[in-house]
Amino acid sequence: MAALRTALSTRIGSQASLTVRTKALRAPRLVAARVGRVQRVVAASVDKEQVLTDVRSIIAEQLGTDLDKVAADSKFVDLGADSLDTVEIMMALEEKFDITLDEENAEKISTVGEAAEMISQQMS
């Protein structure tokens, strides 16, 4: 954190007051430095395609199936997931993306793409 603060203050001027949003430091979230009233973007926002790729990979691993069989429109049940598998998938996704999916919304997720979209929304 101190290294980031030093690098940013060197880059944008040591006289400016600097606030770094620490919650945003989890990749690939948006990291912003605020100088006075001007906000400068330091890193890019969520890459939805990368999120989908990671979600597909995690689901394939959790279910012990080939990645080629896991498409965005694949339903968990069609991939052979039972309710316990689905809970384990959600836990693995929360761990990978360092997020918490609320139970009510997580229960509504039935496809790989829906999971990726919910994660992307929560990360942006």
Image: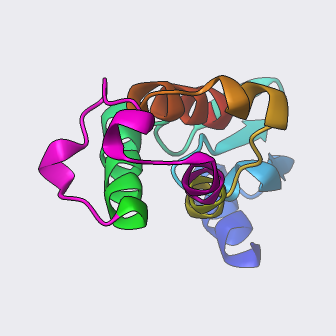
Q: Nearer the viewer, residue 5 or 24?
A: 24
Residue 19 lies, in percent from the top left, at 84, 48
Among the 4 quarters of the image, the one containing residue 57: bottom left
Give the residue drawn at x 51%, y 49%.
28
27 up-or-down from 48: above or below: below
Q: Which residues are magenta?
A: 64-90
Among the 4 quarters of the image, the one containing residue 112: top left
Give the residue drawn at x 61%, y 67%.
7
Residue 15 visible in the current orientation = no
Report if residue 89 lies within the magenta region.
Answer: yes
124 up-or-down from 95: above or below: above
Q: Residue furthest left?
A: 68
Q: Nearer the viewer, residue 20 or 22?
A: 22
Number of numbered tags placed on the structure image: 0
Residue 109 visible in the current orientation = yes
Q: Nearer the viewer, residue 41 or 13?
A: 41
Give the residue drawn at x 80%, y 48%.
21
Q: Quadrant of the N terminus?
A: bottom right
